[in-house]
Amino acid sequence: MKLTWIPVCCALFTVAPVYAGESAELPFGASLPAMLDWLDQHHPEIQAMQQESLAAMARVTPAGALPDPMFRMELQDIDRSNPTLAPNKVGSTKYSFIQSLPWWGKRDLQRGVAESEAKRVGTQVAQTRNELRARLKVGYAQFFYSHTAARVNQELAEIAARLEQVAQTRYANGLAPQQDALKAQLEKTSLSAERLSLTSEIRQAEARLNVLLLRPVNAQLTPPLALPGLDKGLPSADLASLALQRNPQIQSQNAQIESAQASRKLADSNRYPDFALGIAPIQTGNRVEKFEVMLEMNLPLRWDVRNAQRDEAGAMLAAAESRKNAAEQQLRGDIEEARSAYLLAQSQQQLLSNTLLPQAQLTFRSALAGYENGKVDFTTVLDSIRQIRQLRLDLARNQKEQLTRQAELEKWIGEEL
């Protein structure tokens, strides 16, 4: 019996395109960039961090402002026989206007502490955004892999069904044993069981993406046909250097160091007194004939308190610098690990696409032709199909790994690669 359906089988097992262009008109789920844009604009965690950043920026101006002036009115020499609170009917009334004045430079230091805190909160906006985008990309990569595995499973099921027909025909003609048909049936049953597991994986991947995108958990997403952006590869620049310059966590540590440095200088300045200046016109009857001028200052005699404050500020600065050093070292290791894994997956993908899969397809065609002529047993045909299946899955797994590692690198570097 001639296997006229060989071209159909080969078409089913043709290597799918590794990359596909994105279109704004693609339905939700098919376009990763559209999902990322939606995440940036609508996710409440990003919006909450943006509002916290605005709140931190609003605290800068009050931190460096002068305290509100004080007003005090004193009614003096009130007649006990004819008490009154009318300013012109008592012995005298003093109106005091008092303005507190911190030691020179304290306001600038207080403003610097608030500005550093605003920078730190601002970096958390970028860090939250990067982490959410990385989670979306990793979830999308798993979503792509599960759907690819399901498509390969369906293709293999169609091949197994056709092989079963061929095996039954050859068995009826006395050209093959009945075991060939039974093996094809067993393969179909195994694929059906696998399909149930893959369906569950797809639902789980959809649920994770829907939760991240604030959609109903059971809402369906359009299956992706390819993963975007992998054809660009990694930039030639030193990724670790880029990350140290742009990583939000490192920038947050830098802001904490700036805040600690300003706090230590502020603790030093607390050794000097603060002042208060006041002027007090004095009313007698209906006239103001006298004025008083006041100068007030605190006496910073508690050197133990001042020393403790300075020690605290110094310890906070040392802690911030240590955390930054630890974060930089960890970041270098993470960057190199993700980079190496990305390059390995990229090399394996090229090997699969350009060499292994074409060779496996040739083996499949040869096995089919050999089975037609009775020179190859049925097991060899099944093995060749399974080999192509495994290579197709390996290719999708490598694409998933590349996007996962790319997402990690972008999270640490702080921008798209």
Image (tube, rainbow, N blue to C red):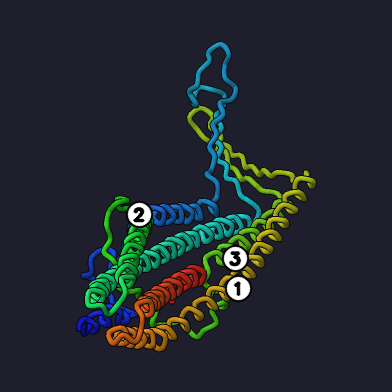
Q: Residue 165 occupies which quadrant of the picture?
A: bottom left
361 to the left or right of 166: right
Q: Is residue 317 visible?
A: yes
Q: x and y percent of residue 377 in the render?
A: 36, 80
Residue type at numbered disc 3: Asn
Q: Quadrant of the C terminus?
A: bottom left
- Give the labeled residue for mark 3: 254
| Mark whose residue sits in front, 3 or 2 | 2
The residue at 25%/81% (across/down) is 11
| Mark whose residue sits in front, 1 or 2 | 2
Please tell me whether mark 3 sits on a helix, a strand or a loop: helix
Q: x and y percent of residue 58 in the render?
A: 46, 53
Q: x and y percent of residue 29 in the render?
A: 29, 64
- Give the labeled residue for mark 2: 207
For this rendering, which residue is in front, 325 or 335?
335
Residue type at numbered disc 2: Ala
Please tell me whether mark 1 sits on a helix, a strand or a loop: helix
Report crowding for label 1: few under 14, some 14 to 19, many 20 or more residues within 10 A (C-alpha): some
The residue at 45%/69% (across/down) is 404
Determine the CA span between mark 3 and mark 2: 38 Å
Determine the CA span between mark 1 and mark 3: 17 Å
49 to the left or right of 257: left
For this rendering, which residue is in front, 148 or 410?
148
| Mark whose residue sits in front, 1 or 3 | 1
Task: Check the image and report above or below for 374 versus 65.
Answer: below
For this rendering, which residue is in front, 116 or 367?
367
Mark 1 vs 3: CB contact within 8 A: no
The residue at 57%/74% (across/down) is 337
Q: Residue 105 occupies which quadrant of the picture?
A: bottom right
